[in-house]
Image (spheres, rainbow, N blue to C red):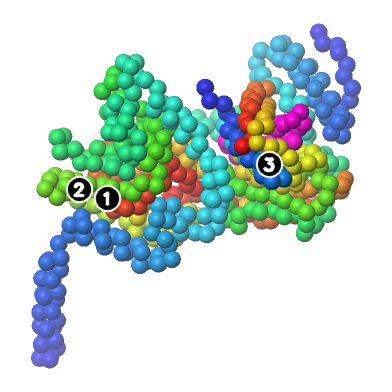
């Protein structure tokens, strides 16, 4: 019988890290007792709650605890019409200083947050990636610079494939 | 058995560019199979890049990242011959790691 | 009234001479080749000749940009690695693929398909791979994807850049017949949608069918096998031919059916001189 108590999970990233580590241990022992569906706890440091949010505002609130202001200093490279919604190449870069994080969201996806990147000092504030888009949607790039959030967005059209090329 | 991580790290004058491709289904959990059953979510959650004892990049991925995910970024420093270690962990607790030399 | 009749007669005579003239210009593979090539270079004067092998990417700038971004680290890389492993791994009897092919199987993709005058049939690369496996007591691959795609991806890769060099021996009427049958298949309508290959790839390259941009028939096989975003994986020529048949709501033939092999013979000959670009990526 499990009687271990664990501290309330806080929403800050550090809190999430601690909470996640504990959850992993707890999850592992719970798995021993379960016979049916096994679910592994998420990887250490993975912001589970942020990845469950449906709207952009909720993602930013959960992930950063703040809102973003639109900035033309954040550059988002994404196609006008995606070749295929399963593999959409995007690139984000910025001239803003002291960047610690870059995140990208797809507004019309079931969960808005697609990916988030931690940028330590010495790493350039630029990333290229390939995303899945469920349908035509705004793609939003967010940069955390000197503690503040800045964003830009672009609409990417996604069409259903026909007979092929 | 080849690693699931392919990486190309090239040292330039001031920065090193890293490109990596990982073999992973990145199932979102929203897609059904031929029988109409949902294919459970199975995707990489974290990817960490380390060199010279320092973490130079961390990716936190959700299921919206494409199958066989790709990532490209650059960091200051790094020189030819240095080791670059990449580790991913997925939502099932599986992990893979590889170390490549910066060219 | 009389003048009308005279005009009709004159026209009929003219038509008669025109018909006679048309019969003199016989269709031969060489003449077909020139006509086919000129059709595409005239229709798309701005597309460099070798670029046609890039299919829809030679036709649409937006698609091309996304493709170039992905070629940085192409999705077929894993299949290529796996293909090399499979290619070099000895069979149970100790032999390898190298023992079945000229030049040990390296750098020969551009010569396939060829007409085998002993068995009087078209031999494609995919068929040759499975023939090699069977000859050496191994289980043949499924023609559509996975191992077949991996091995042919590797073999194509060793030929990258080499111009297609398909031979139709003039002195072998059966070879010419196979070519002609392939050509017929290409231009013949089929399926509930009543499309021929030409309906899309000759009449409408660069245009959209529903939401996808159509590839030109010129060099259409040069990038095979391909990683298609739509498939989320690799596919061979067999996979593409059968799925195209299904997509026009026709009943697909068996992979490597003689009709498909003749079709591949025709299309590959039309691409002579254009480089092997496989393995490739496609939407």
Q: Residue at x 53, y 42 (%)?
A: C74
Considering the image in quadrants, where does the N terminus of chain A appear?
top right
Q: Chain of mark 3?
A: B
Q: Are marks 2 and 1 on the same chain?
A: yes
Q: Nearer the viewer, residue B67 or B55?
A: B55
Q: Nearer the viewer, mark 2 or mark 3?
A: 3
Q: Is residue A59 toward the left or the right of residue C209 in the image?
A: right
What range is drawn magenta here?
A: B45-68
Can residue B61 be seen here? The reply is yes
Identify the chain of the residue marked 1, using the numbered disc in the image.
Answer: C
Please give the label number shown on residue C269: 1
Q: Which residue is mark 2?
A: C168
Mark 1 touching mark 3, by CB under 8 A? no
Q: Is residue C221 visible?
A: no
- Distance of mark 2 from mark 3, alpha carbons? 51 Å
Vertical comparison of A130 with A5: above or below: below
Q: Give the labeled residue for mark 3.
A: B16
Specify the quadrant of the image occupied by residue B55.
top right
Q: Are marks 2 and 1 in contact (CB under 8 Å)?
A: yes
Is the residue at mark 1 from the same chain as the one at mark 3? no
Q: Where residue C222 appears, x then y in whole percent? A: 37, 47
């Amino acid at each position: 019988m499990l009687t271990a108590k664990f501290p309330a999970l806080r929403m800050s990233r550090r809190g999430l890290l601690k909470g996640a580590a504990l959850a992993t241990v707890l999850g592992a022992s719970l798995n021993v007792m379960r016979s049916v569906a096994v679910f592994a706890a998420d990887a250490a440091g993975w912001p589970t709650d942020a990845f469950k949010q449906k709207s952009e505002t909720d993602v930013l609130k959960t992930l950063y605890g703040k809102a973003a202001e639109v900035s033309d200093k954040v550059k988002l490279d994404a196609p006008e019409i995606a070749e295929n919604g399963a593999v959409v190449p995007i690139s984000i870069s910025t001239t803003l200083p002291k960047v610690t994080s870059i995140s990208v969201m797809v507004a019309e996806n079931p969960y808005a947050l697609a990916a988030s990147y931690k940028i330590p000092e010495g790493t350039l504030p630029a990333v290229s990636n390939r995303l899945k888009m469920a349908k035509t949607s705004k793609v939003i790039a967010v940069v955390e610079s000197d503690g503040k959030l800045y964003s830009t967005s672009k609409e990417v059209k996604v069409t259903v494939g026909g007979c092929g090329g | 058995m080849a690693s699931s991580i392919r990486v190309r790290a090239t040292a330039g004058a001031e920065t090193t560019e890293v490109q990596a491709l990982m073999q992973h289904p990145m199932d979102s959990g929203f897609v059904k199979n031929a029988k109409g059953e949902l294919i459970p979510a199975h995707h990489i959650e974290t990817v960490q890049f380390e060199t010279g004892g320092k973490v130079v990049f961390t990716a936190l991925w959700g299921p919206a990242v494409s199958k066989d995910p790709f990532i490209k970024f650059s960091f200051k420093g790094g020189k030819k011959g240095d080791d670059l270690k990449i580790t991913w962990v997925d939502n099932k607790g599986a992990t893979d790691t590889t170390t490549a030399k910066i060219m | 009234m009389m003048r009308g009749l005279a005009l009709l007669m004159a026209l009929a005579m003219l038509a008669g001479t025109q018909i006679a003239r048309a019969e003199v210009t016989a269709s031969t593979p060489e003449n077909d080749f020139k006509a086919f090539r000129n059709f595409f270079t005239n229709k798309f004067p701005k597309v460099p000749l070798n670029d046609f092998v890039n299919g829809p990417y030679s036709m649409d700038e937006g698609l091309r940009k996304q493709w170039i971004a992905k070629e940085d680290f192409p999705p077929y890389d894993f299949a290529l690695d796996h293909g090399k492993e499979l290619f070099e791994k000895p069979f149970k009897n100790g032999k390898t693929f190298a023992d079945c092919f000229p030049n040990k199987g390296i750098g020969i993709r551009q010569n396939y398909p060829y007409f085998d005058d002993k068995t009087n049939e078209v031999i494609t690369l995919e068929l040759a791979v499975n023939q090699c496996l069977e000859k050496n007591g191994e289980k043949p691959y499924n023609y559509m994807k996975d191992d077949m795609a991996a091995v042919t991806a590797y073999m194509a890769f060793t030929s990258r850049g080499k111009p297609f060099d398909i031979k139709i021996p003039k002195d072998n009427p059966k070879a010419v017949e196979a070519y002609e049958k392939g050509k017929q298949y290409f231009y013949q309508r089929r399926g509930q949608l009543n499309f021929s290959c030409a309906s899309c790839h000759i009449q409408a390259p660069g245009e959209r069918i529903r939401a996808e941009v159509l590839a030109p028939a010129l060099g259409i096989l040069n990038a095979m096998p391909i990683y298609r975003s739509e498939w989320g994986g690799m596919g061979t020529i067999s996979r593409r031919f059968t799925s195209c048949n299904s997509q026009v709501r026709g009943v697909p033939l068996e992979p490597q059916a003689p009709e498909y092999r003749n079709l591949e013979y025709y299309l590959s000959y039309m691409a002579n001189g254009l480089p092997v670009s496989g393995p490739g990526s496609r939407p």
